[in-house]
Image: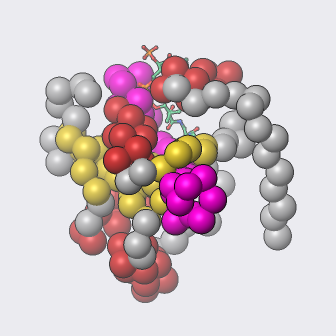
Amino acid sequence: VPDDLNIRPATEADLGPLLGLYRHLSPEDIQLGGDVADAIWAAMLRASGVLPLVGEVDEQLVTTCILVVVPNLTRGGRSFAIIENVVTHPSYRRRGFGTAILREAIDRAWSMNCYKVVLTTGSKRESTLCFYEKVGFKRGTRTAFEMRR
Ligand SMILES: CC(C)(COP(=O)(O)OP(=O)(O)OC[C@H]1O[C@@H](n2cnc3c(N)ncnc32)[C@H](O)[C@@H]1OP(=O)(O)O)[C@@H](O)C(=O)NCCC(=O)NCCS
């Protein structure tokens, strides 16, 4: 882990800075705020198996991802995990922070007895896909489908 990065589970006070970071995830996304965001954040922090992680440098949030662990009755009762919303602030990229927060999320998944961690991305950028591969995710082993409304 880069030595100036502090990774921890997010807390209530991280909402504002986290919403700021998310603007760099998909700039065209709807900006949440106010009571709506407060209510969703409270629900996220209460929900079991939902773990938003943040990485800070000098008390600034610079990287984040969310880990979701799903209890499971197959695979001998081992859980599976999903990682979503991976982003590093543009001014702090290429310093290993994205790798570090993903490693932390993966370590936590293994320590919670998950048999797999799934991560999908809509990104077509080869640099982003390589980033995930370097962390250890395999490409092309599964076929992903999605439906949206
Ligand atoms: C993808 C992203 C999370 C990477 O975060 P990061 O903190 O820069 O990642 P790291 O510094 O740990 O990068 C590790 C390696 O990934 C590769 N990589 C990451 N970004 C790269 C880029 N823009 N070009 C080339 N290689 C890149 C490099 O090999 C890098 O290692 P290096 O710095 O030694 O070259 C970040 O670029 C980002 O937030 N992008 C916009 C949001 C996004 O696309 N999120 C994923 C959607 S699912």
Which colour scheme appears in the figure?
secondary structure
Question: In the picture provided, is 54 more to the left or to the right than 89?
Answer: left
| Residue 13 visible, this orientation | yes
Question: Residue 125: percent from the left, percent from the top?
Answer: 68, 27
Instruction: Specify the quadrant of the image occupied by residue 106.
Output: top left
Q: Is residue 4 above or below residue 111?
A: above
Question: Residue 89: percent from the left, percent from the top?
Answer: 41, 40
Q: Which residues are magenta?
A: 70-99
* Relative depth, front residue between 84 and 113: 113
In the image, residue 91 lies in the stretch drawn in magenta:
yes
Question: Residue 49: percent from the left, percent from the top?
Answer: 43, 66
Instruction: Specify the quadrant of the image occupied by residue 2.
Output: top left
In the image, residue 52 lies in the stretch drawn in magenta:
no
Which residue occupies the extreme front position in the image?
76
Q: How many discs mark residues in the rendered view? A: 0
Q: Is residue 110 above or below residue 82?
A: above
| Residue at figure coordinates x 17%, y 31% from the top left | 4
Q: Is residue 149 above or below residue 46?
A: above
| Residue at figure coordinates x 38%, y 35% from the top left | 103
Question: Residue 149: percent from the left, percent from the top?
Answer: 82, 70
Q: Is residue 85 above or below residue 50?
A: above
* Relative depth, front residue between 66 and 88: 66
> Quadrant of the image for the N terminus?
top left
| Residue at figure coordinates x 48%, y 26% from the top left | 135
| Residue 125 visible, this orientation | no
Instruction: Specify the quadrant of the image occupied by residue 17.
Output: bottom left
Question: In the picture provided, is 72 more to the left or to the right than 97?
Answer: right
